[in-house]
Image (cartoon, grey):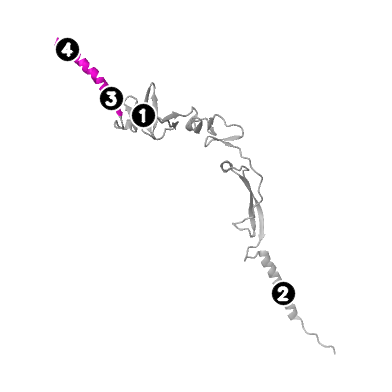
């Protein structure tokens, strides 16, 4: 008679312990260690289910099991959505590596190109595919060539030498952002410089002054060599 009574008491005690064990697995606050950091409600089986304010609830799925974690910033491939009760991390589109929202990608996955927030397999007409950034860049509409610049040699526009003059062709777009993505064209050509610099003289000018001085000296010598004529008898 005692054995069945003891067994009945043991079963009743086990039933009473079940709710207590469940309460132990749930906590209010952040006292369950690193896995529940920032949580308001957390369990050992599923992690966080409610986060503190300003934090995002990130649900990681492994097969049929899911585990919640409270984070300050959503990981790559997810974007944060703030709600009245819970702030959640939602997954980006299938072609997005990272995104700002469900409809606006920041970086695309391999084999896709970013164009105005969308990840496309090929760039649309009127754009060029940039392999380094995996982005579609609009073709530039360049304006007319500018006038040739002054002829320059060794940062000077005077002297007697061969220099270079340059002209450019810039984007005709008015927007700063669009103009920054378009690279202008430039070309240079040789040009002669035959203009003396202030305080300097060219070799031809020096030669000219020397020739004039020589001619003056010869005239003076001829005058000195002239002898007076003898009077007739």
- Span of residues in magenta: 1-27
Q: In the rendered image, which residue does mark 1 sit on? A: 50
Q: In the rendered image, which residue does mark 3 sit on? A: 23
Q: Main secondary structure of the magenta part?
A: helix
Measure the alpha-carbon separation of dots 4 and 1: 44 Å
Number of residues whose C-alpha sits closer than 10 Å to that of mark 2, classed few (under 14), some (14–19) or many (20 or more): few
Q: In the rendered image, which residue does mark 4 sit on? A: 5
Measure the alpha-carbon separation of dots 1 and 3: 16 Å
Nearest the eye: 73 or 155: 73
Q: Earlier in the sequence, mark 2 or mark 4?
A: 4
Q: Earlier in the sequence, mark 4 or mark 1?
A: 4
Residue at image position (62%, 47%) is: 186
Measure the alpha-carbon separation of dots 2 and 4: 149 Å
Q: Earlier in the sequence, mark 1 or mark 2?
A: 1
Q: Position of residue 125 (x, y in %)?
A: 61, 32
Q: Position of residue 6 (x, y in %)?
A: 17, 14
CB atoms at circles 4 and 3 under 8 Å apart?
A: no
Residue 184, picture quadrant:
top right
Residue at image position (70%, 67%) is: 208
Direction top: furthest residue = 1
Label 1: which secondary element: strand
């Amino acid at each position: 008679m005692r054995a069945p009574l003891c067994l009945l008491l043991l079963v009743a005690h086990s039933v009473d312990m079940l709710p207590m064990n469940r309460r132990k697995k749930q906590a209010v606050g952040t006292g369950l260690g690193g896995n529940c950091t920032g949580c308001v409600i957390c369990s050992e089986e599923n992690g966080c289910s409610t986060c503190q304010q300003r934090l995002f609830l990130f649900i990681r799925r492994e097969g049929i099991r899911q585990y919640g974690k409270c984070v300050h910033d959503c990981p790559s491939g997810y974007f944060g959505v703030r709600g009245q009760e819970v702030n959640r991390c939602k997954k980006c589109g299938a072609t997005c590596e990272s995104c700002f929202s469900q409809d606006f990608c920041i970086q695309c996955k391999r084999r896709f190109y970013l164009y105005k927030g969308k990840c496309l397999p090929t760039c649309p007409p009127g754009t060029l595919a940039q392999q380094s950034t995996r982005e579609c860049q609009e073709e530039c509409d360049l304006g007319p060539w500018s006038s040739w610049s002054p002829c320059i040699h060794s940062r000077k526009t005077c002297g007697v030498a061969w220099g270079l003059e340059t002209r450019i062709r810039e984007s005709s777009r008015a927007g700063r952002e669009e103009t920054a993505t378009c690279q202008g064209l430039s070309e240079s050509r040789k040009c002669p410089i035959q203009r003396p610099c202030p305080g300097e003289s060219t070799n031809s000018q020096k030669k000219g002054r020397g020739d004039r001085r020589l001619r003056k000296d010869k005239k003076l010598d001829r005058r000195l060599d002239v002898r007076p004529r003898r009077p007739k008898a």
